[in-house]
Amino acid sequence: MNETFLREVDENLRRDQLEDFFKRYGSWLIVAVVVFLAASGGFIWWKQHEIQRSAEEVETLAAIYKDVGSGKMDQAPQQLADLSKSGSKAVRASASFARAAIAIQQNDTKLAVSTYKSIADDSDLPSAYRDAALIRQTALEFDQLQPADVIARLKPLAKAGDPWFGSAGEMTALALVKQGKRQEAGQLYAAIAKDPGVPQTIRARAIQVAGSLGVDASSAIPTKAQ
């Protein structure tokens, strides 16, 4: 009997506490639920809006490429500049690269360099975009940079196995030659020649330059199948 009585008292107490809780906070809970549903709906709408806007931007980018290919360049620079501010990483990067390419075609090296630099410095972009931009920026600036600056800038990419080893390695080796470090430069050219991931044209050139610097890299020349 005592156990039954105590259980009933406990249940009544819990019920009273629950009723008291809803009397005090029920309206706030309703507001919280409404806000949550509104926020969720807003987020879903925003995502759909972003997807639709990205699709429209891709179509615009394709149209710009078509115009440029047809020689219609008047509006392309401004259109690309606008798209380079896109919230879509792919659209932003593609538009920026295209804008830099047009700048080079128009002999505006300063704009091309600053555009590549903006891509390379954009921490929100994947490293593939940033590394490519850094390579192109450095190539355009190479003659104006101090050799030590070239070497420091490209150090993360000028190592065997990196996708940009060929280009970054060549510029680094040239900077070493400018510093009078011919043996070190020759060794780097030899390493480039031996890396199977480097494009064949760069490897072939590296073999020749390494030889001119006193480093034999002829073992990297592919042998014909017997």
Image: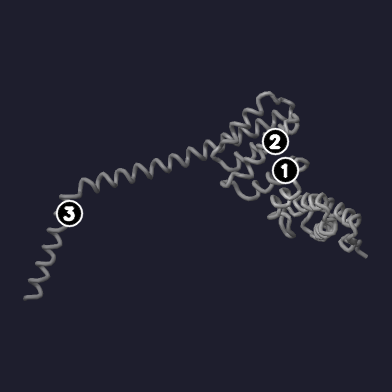
Q: Is residue 201 above or below residue 86?
A: below
Instruction: State the residue position of label 3.
Output: 21
Circles 3, 1 touching at the beta carbon (< 8 Å): no
x then y, percent, for residue 161: 73, 59
x then y, percent, for residue 91: 60, 39
Q: Amino acid at mark 1?
A: Arg
Q: Amino acid at mark 2?
A: Ala
Foreground disc of the pair 3, 1: 1
Residue sitting nearer the eye, 189 or 25: 189
Q: Is residue 195 above or below residue 24?
A: below
Give the mark nearest the N terminus, 3 or 2.
3
Q: Report the Cα–Cα distance between label 1 and label 2.
A: 9 Å
Instruction: State the residue position of label 2.
Output: 112
Q: Write the residue at 78% across / 41% down.
A: 143
Residue sitting nearer the eye, 128 or 145: 145
x then y, percent, for residue 123: 58, 47
Instruction: State the residue position of label 1.
Output: 136
